[in-house]
Image (tube, rainbow, N blue to C red):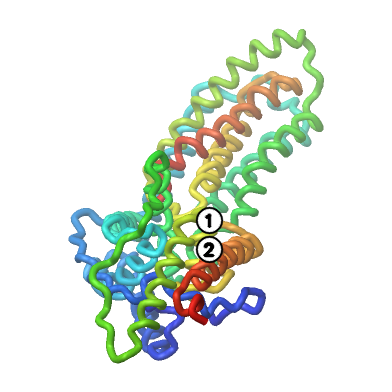
């Protein structure tokens, strides 16, 4: 609340549309039948969702096992496509739930920048660090479809868990914030895919692993946001 | 009329809002009885805000109920130390936009707007100026309902709810410049409507 800002017109002469009318009746009281979770309960639910999502991804990795040539994978490749996406994913999740100045979430420019740039950076990192694929491009694409499906399936449970934990809690910018949750889950799964998938080709990594990040972000924006919006 | 522009009760208004902020923080921690204190301060403001946005009293009442229910659901997401008013205005705005979208085929901007019950009784000999003031208020409402929702909500928040540009920008999820521009465009549209009314008024025609 503040006095009139200097750059705004002097609109003190504009009458209130409610002036001259009978006062509005007092709002009817509301009986709280089922209040939402308290702060502590919500915090607990977020941790449970994080554990369920993380546990699901770890369990999938445990079942499929590490790629056979993991010991020979260059350090730069591991850092760029295995470690950095996890950090970026965690940053996305943090930015999505951060309350911001008024408790309304981070600024939309920051949310949009993160949601758009991290998947793009993941794609760029693929181009920079992935070795050329030794086989034919078509074969790479066929494997890519398989890998894309696996990566997307791995993100589904974390997204469902996020939906339960964050339902009706994004008072504003729900689409961008939900997209960030999707992108965050997608990036962590993409990093895990690097640990599992022995294919390191640019096309494969970009289309299948990176494609899953984009698909997960879109799922977050279009589907998850319907649940998370308050 | 509006909480932010009435100078007389500014101190007590601030005090009430501070109490509501504290009550909301307690309510977010799970203390259900605190909701009564929030309701008594926030609900009348939300009702006026929604009434100015949608132009129909019955719809504003419905949207208020929806807003309060959403506040219950989202209470755990309320940041301790934050002000409850911008937070609740944002939820009210969401409710309004949802209603506006669902009624896109039969627009929410119904014309003419609600009469809002019987007029306040005219006191003394200044009946003509009272009628003129009432017509001006109607003209403002017509102009508000005719403009885009984005302009309307920016203008209502800044002019009638007494929000700062920074807070309005947070509530609307837009940049401060965008909010200023929308409010200015709304102001121009309202100004044009008031000028038109002034040209048509009998007092001016006689002069």
Residue B79 shown left or right of residue A191 in the figure = left
Residue name at image x 68 percent, y 13 percent: A141
Residue A9 lies, in percent from the top left, at: 62, 75
Nearest the eye: B160 or A106: B160
Q: Secondary structure at mark 2?
A: helix
Task: State whether residue B184 is above or below residue A189.
Answer: below
Image mark 2: chain: B
Residue B141 in view of the camera: yes
- Give the quadrant of residue B183: bottom right
Residue at the spot of label 2: B154
Residue B62 shown left or right of residue B139 in the figure = left
Residue name at image x 42 percent, y 39 percent: A52
Q: Are marks 2 and 1 in contact (CB under 8 Å)?
A: yes
Count of numbered badges drawn on the protein? 2
Image mark 1: chain: B
> Mark number for residue A106?
none
Residue name at image x 38 percent, y 57 percent: B54
Q: Secondary structure at mark 1?
A: helix
Residue B71 lies, in percent from the top left, at: 33, 59
Around disc 2, counting alpha carbons within 10 Å, would you say few (fewer than 14), some (14 to 19), or many (20 or more)?
many
Q: Tell if the residue under mark 2 belongs to the same chain as the one under mark 1.
A: yes
Task: State whether residue A154 is above or below residue A120.
Answer: above
Residue ranking furthest to the front: B206
Task: State whether residue A43 is above or below residue A204.
Answer: below
> Mark number for residue B150?
1
Separation (CA) of disc 2 from disc 1: 6 Å
Residue name at image x 48 percent, y 61 percent: B143
Around disc 1, counting alpha carbons within 10 Å, would you say few (fewer than 14), some (14 to 19), or many (20 or more)?
some
Residue A47 lies, in percent from the top left, at: 42, 49
């Amino acid at each position: 609340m503040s006095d009139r800002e200097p750059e705004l017109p002097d609109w003190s002469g504009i009458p209130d549309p409610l002036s001259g009318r009978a006062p509005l009746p007092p709002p009817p009281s509301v009986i709280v039948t089922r209040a939402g979770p308290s702060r502590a309960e919500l915090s607990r639910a977020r941790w449970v969702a994080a554990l369920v999502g993380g546990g699901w991804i770890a369990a999938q990795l445990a079942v499929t096992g590490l790629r056979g040539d993991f010991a020979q994978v260059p350090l730069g490749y591991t850092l760029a496509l295995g470690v950095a996406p996890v950090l970026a994913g965690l940053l996305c999740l943090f930015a999505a739930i951060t309350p911001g100045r008024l408790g309304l979430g981070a600024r939309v420019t920051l949310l949009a920048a993160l949601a758009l740039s991290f998947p793009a950076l993941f794609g760029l990192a693929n181009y920079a660090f992935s070795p050329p694929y030794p086989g034919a491009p078509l074969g790479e694409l066929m494997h890519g479809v398989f890998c894309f499906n696996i990566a997307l399936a791995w993100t589904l449970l974390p997204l469902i868990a996020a939906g339960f934990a964050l339902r009706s809690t994004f008072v504003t910018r729900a689409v961008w914030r939900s997209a960030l949750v999707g992108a965050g889950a997608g990036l962590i799964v993409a990093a895990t895919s690097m640990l599992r998938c022995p294919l390191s080709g640019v096309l494969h990594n970009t289309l299948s692993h990176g494609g899953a990040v984009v698909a997960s972000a879109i799922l977050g924006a279009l589907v998850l946001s319907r649940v998370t919006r308050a | 009329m509006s909480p932010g522009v009435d100078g007389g009760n500014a101190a007590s208004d601030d005090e009430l809002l501070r109490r509501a902020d504290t009550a909301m923080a307690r309510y977010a921690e799970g203390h259900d009885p605190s909701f009564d204190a929030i309701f008594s301060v926030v609900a009348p403001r939300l009702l006026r805000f929604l009434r100015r946005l949608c132009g129909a009293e019955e719809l504003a009442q419905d949207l208020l109920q929806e807003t309060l229910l959403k506040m219950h659901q989202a209470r755990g997401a309320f940041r301790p130390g934050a002000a409850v008013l911008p937070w609740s205005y944002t939820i009210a705005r969401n409710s309004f936009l949802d209603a506006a979208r669902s009624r896109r085929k039969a627009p929410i901007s119904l014309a003419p707007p609600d009469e809002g019950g019987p007029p306040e009784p005219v006191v003394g000999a200044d009946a003509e100026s009272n009628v003129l003031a009432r017509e001006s208020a109607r003209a403002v409402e017509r102009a508000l309902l005719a403009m885009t929702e984005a302009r309307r909500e920016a203008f209502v928040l800044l002019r009638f709810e007494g929000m700062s540009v920074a807070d309005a920008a947070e509530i609307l999820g837009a940049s401060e410049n965008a909010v200023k521009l929308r409010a200015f465009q709304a102001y121009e549209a309202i100004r044009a409507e008031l000028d038109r009314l002034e040209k048509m008024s009998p007092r001016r025609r006689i002069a």
